[in-house]
Image: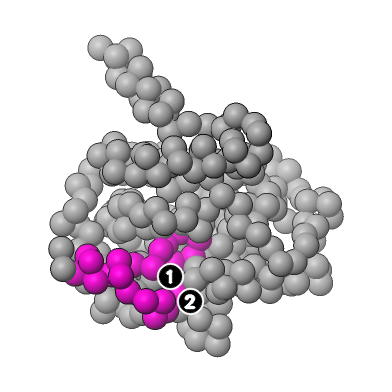
Amino acid sequence: MAVCNCFLQAPPLSRFLLPVFSRRAATLSAGYGRLKATVMFSSSVNRAGPLISPVRAEVKRASRKDDEVALASDLQFETPLKIVKYPDPILRAKNKKIGVFDENLKNLVDAMFDIMYKTDGIGLAAPQVGLNVQLMVFNPAGEPGEGEEIVLVNPKIKKYSDKVVPYEEACLSFPGIYGDVVRPQSVKIDAMDITGARFSISLSRLPARIFQHEYDHLEGVLFFDRMTDQVLDSIREQLEALEKKYEEKTGLPSPERVQERQKRKAGVGFGKR
Ligand SMILES: [Zn+2]
């Protein structure tokens, strides 16, 4: 537990995971050696298992042949960008494919990196800044001028590794919330770059983790959707606090409630019996 406390109290030495990851994770992201240590740390907390099937199911859903193409109005933004927080319905909306690779897209990518670095993130998906389009940026180093800045437009996962690993994730749309998520250790991706050129890339370890978290955002999936009930229980009150905050701020009922999700799951269980 000493290790854990150390991570919790770590000053902002480096950026943490993008959209997802938090300071603890960020600390880990400083190098692969540390990443390995982190994964091991996480595995002592986590019990992997039944998440493998849902992940594979996700892959099948990933073919977006009928994807709607974004209009210019879908890509309009104002700087500084603001991070959209749970339970804003923007995080669950469908994300359109990008078909125009112009100066506006480059400016958007620059603005996304800016807000990502400013919020100590290591990755960010477009819906997290209020734009429902298939775009993500990340830099596992979390610092401008360090590491490698990766921009993926209209990405698709072609292959997952059989090996899955637990890792403690955070998300800029869920400030201060951390929880273990089990995901494949590596993935192969087809995507486009900022000029519209197609390419394939294989990622593993931290870059694969960040990518999958961001890719989920493009599918309207949030990291707590993939947590075990036990992990979810540990952050339920924090999620409910965000739901309450949203209601106070907007005057609208929360579009989703973590409590209802748990009831639904229980209902399915009884149905099977
Ligand atoms: Zn996220």
Whether 77 is drawn above or below 142: the answer is: above
Amino acid at circle 1: Phe
Residue 9, magenta (yes or no): yes
Q: Position of residue 240 (x, y in %)?
A: 44, 37
Q: Which residue is rendered at x = 37% and y = 76% of the image? A: 11
Instruction: Residue lying at the far bottom in this picture: please name it.
Output: 145
Q: Which residue is rendered at x = 54% and y = 68% of the image? A: 119
Residue 197 is drawn in which quadrant?
A: bottom right
Of residue 97 and residue 250, the one placed in the foreground of this image is 250
Residue identifier under label 1: 16
Query: Is residue 134 at all visible to an observer of this figure?
Result: no
Element type at marker 1? loop
Residue identifier under label 2: 142
Q: Position of residue 227 (x, y in %)?
A: 34, 43
Magenta stretch bounds:
3-24
Element type at marker 2? loop
Residue 29 is drawn in which quadrant?
A: bottom left
Q: Position of residue 172 (x, y in %)?
A: 50, 58
